[in-house]
Structures are given as structure tokens and as C-alpha cells.
Amino acid sequence: MEILPLLSSISILLIYLLLSHNYSNYFFSAFKLCTPFINSTHFHHQISPISDQFPQTSPPVSLTKVAKTRLTREQKLELGLAQARASIRKAANHSNLSLSTSLHYLPSSSVYHNPRVFYQSYVEMERRLKVYVYPEGELPITHDGPCKNIYTIEGRFIHEMENGGNGFRTVDPGRAHVMFMPFSVAWMVKYLYKDGSYDQTPLRMFVSDYVGVVSRKYPFWNKTNGADHFILACHDWGPIATEGNPFLYNTSIRVLCNANSSEGFNPQKDVSLPEIHLYNGDISPKLLSPPPHPAESQQHRPHLAFFAGGLHGPIRPIILNHWKNRTDSNIHVYEYLPKELDYYDQMLQSRFCLCPSGYEVASPRIVEAIYAECVPVVISEQYVLPFSDVLRWEGFSIQVSVSEIPRLKEILMGVSEEKYEKLKEGLRTVRKHFVLNRPAKRFDVFHMILHSLWLRRLNVKLA
């Protein structure tokens, strides 16, 4: 008499596995981890598009019917992800999918790879995503971080994740899609690193010890070798700190400002984090309301391009060598900005802002330029730009290779007025995605980071 219930349970499980066949083989096996394709000009490995990931070769099975059966918590979690994938696929296959105007969101095809799919994925994230924050660790290195400097985003994300009341955090690890290890690499450098020693061992040791603690105390790390765990670091040494555990480095999701694909950053699993420099913890008042656009752009932005910065890294010396003090070209480049000039005023008076990498690939000038509606001219090598799995950077920025620096004036003068206005419109559209709000608001940088994590947990390609 007990055989029939057993067969029924087995049938239910088989249906469930068929519904999520693209997922069941990889997330619970760290050795078969299949991570998403990130649309980046620096990473050309291809996997099948989203339409191929959810083939319709067999009659559809009702997810609702399966949901009503008795499933374990783990199975319910995976079923919810299967439903989200189905919803995203439907958005990808229906060009006339309506978007709710009540959500105050107007997608633009010029700055998103696929606005409908992004919107649907974002809504599914808001509906489902749960993050468990490990309580282990003591202040100041864990559960805290800087909120007023170039590493602002470290502290602000940790504080919002733990105290923001945003609805994503769960105190029940069994309901979580991802696990957050809330330590700050910037604070490690401040409190553990011996200044001038160039010895980064204490950072690696701290990370190794932290992973050791949570892997011994909880079962979650060992189930996936950390594949559903993430850390967030904006300090240049974030990648170095993650070397403290090989699975953290190679398997976990690392949310990093230093997103250099030639130095171990893997855009298939890692997340590129925008570097946001807030001197006093808030956006400068000058950048809150940039000058008016269309017809008055020439009047308010008389300069073609602007840059001010010291000899920091290999790219800036080339820019300074070619363009420093050449005001006849209308490209204003300074090693040290004269005292009578204001940095943000110069950005607001320029059509283009040069954003070269320093010693590391990320630059806070990119976000400052977005705030100032000064079209960013990104000059870097092997930099995976933030949120590039969703955003089309060519819709609101110009990318120039190092070899093209001598031709900067020619390249920028070659941008038609029509294209320039479209780039400016793109900047106004994406600005909300790069703003740190207190408390967090829909579609802001906090939510975009979570959406990047959501995509990697879903294992889908939006572009």
C-alpha cells in the first residue's frame, strides 16, 4: 500500500526536474557550474541565447500544478526560479508585451540590450530574490564599510543590505537564493594592512578564516563550493583578498570595482561594480541639476572635452603627453587643475569627459560624468563595464582605445550633433542606475547590483 505514494512522489520529482532541466545539473554541482554569458566587448565566449535555453520541443507542463504538490524547500526555491525563467522567456518572445506605466519606468532600446526582458527580469527579482547575510564577524571589518570616499559603495551596500528594510534580506537561510559575506576589503586595508609593507597576506588570511567559519557552521557553502555566495569589494585589492580561498576566487560571485578581465575577473560569474566617489556621502549639489539640454547644449558646454588628473597608471601619461595645455584644440587636459577652476564646473561646461583607467581599470570619473551629463569617453584595456549584461554602453558613452588617444579630437569632432543628443538622452535614462539612495529606490545602483546577482543565480542571458 505504501508503493503508490512513493511512485507519486517520484513522478512529481521527475516533472520538476524536467521543468528545470537546464538548471538542476549545474547549480548543485560545483564541478558542472554553468554561468551566464555577459555581453562584453572584452569577453567573446558564447553560449546559447535565451530562446535556446528554454526549448519548446515537448508539450508544456503546468508549473502551477507542480507548485501545489508537496515539495521540499529546496525544490520550491528551484521551482520559483523555473517560473521566473519562463516569464522572462515569454517577455523575450513577445515584442508587444505591455509595460506598466504605473511603475514610472520608460525603457529605451538605445541603452538596454532588451528593455522588455530586462524589465521582466527585474520585476521577477523584486518578487522573488532573497539574500541571507551571514551574521558572523565583528565590527569594523564586517557588517560595516566606508560611506564617504572613493570606496563609498562598500559601506553603503552593506548598510542597505543589513538595515535598509528593502525586502530582499531573509533571516531564514533556507529561503535564500544567494548568501552574502559582509566584510569590507577597504576596512581590511585600513585595520589589518601594515602601511608601506606591501604585504597583502593579512587580507587573504582574513578571507580564508571567514570562509572557514561559515563553511563549518552552515551546510550551504559545502553544497555548492560557494557558487551561490557573494562578496562585494570596491578597493583595488578586492581581487587579491579573494585569493584567500580558491573556491571564493574561482566559483563564488565576486562583485568588484576592479573588474579587469586580464587579472582574473570572470564576467561569466563576477559582477562589475561602479566606482562612486562621494566626498561627503552625497552627490555634489552641482551635479544634482545639470544644465538644460537640447538647444542650449552648445551655449552651456563650450568645451569639447575635459580631463584633470595626475600621472596615475600607464594610460594617463599618454593623454597628458598629447593633450596637456593644448587649449587650441578645445580639449582641456590638466595634470593639476588650476586653483581658479572648479572640477565639476569644468565637467558641466564640457561635451565629453575623458575617463581613463589609472593603475586599475575602474574610474570614478565615469559615474561623475554620468551625473554631469558629460558624455563619458572610456579609455581602458580589459575593463568589463558595470551592468554591461543589461546596458548598451555605446548608447550613452564613447569608447576609445589607448592607441587612438592621439586622434581624440578627430574622433570627438566626428560625433554628429544628432548622435551627441542621443548620447545625452541615454545619460539621462541610465543616471538612476548609478545613484546611491538612502533608502534605496527602484532601479538605483543597489537594485542593479542585486539584479546582476539575480541574473547569475538564474543563469540566463538577457542580451
Image: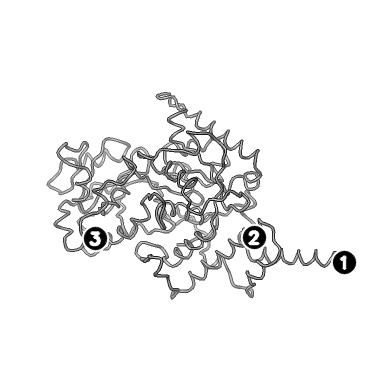
Numbered-mark total: 3
For residue 1, the mark is: 1
**Extreme residue toward the left, this view:** 328
Amino acid on which the number 1 mark rests in the picture: Met
Distance from disc 3 to disc 1, alpha carbons, whole Å, reads 75 Å
Residue named by callout 3: 420
In the drawing, what numbered circle is on residue 76?
2
- Neighbor class of circle 3 (other Cα within 10 Å; few <14, some 14-19, many 20+) is some
Determine whether the residue tagged by mark 2 lies in a helix, strand or loop. helix
Looking at the image, do the residues carrying marks 1 and 2 touch, with CB atoms under 8 Å apart?
Answer: no
* Distance of label 1 from label 2 (alpha carbons): 27 Å
Would residue 12 be found to the left or right of residue 209 on screen? right
Which one is earlier in the sequence, the residue at label 1 or at label 2? 1
Q: Nearer the viewer, residue 340 or 35?
A: 340
Residue 186 at x, y percent in the picture: 43, 35
**Residue 275, horizontal then vertical, whole percent:** 37, 45
317 up-or-down from 99: above or below: above
Q: The residue under label 3 is which amino acid type? A: Tyr
Could you say where residue 249 lies in the image, as x and y percent from the top left? 53, 41
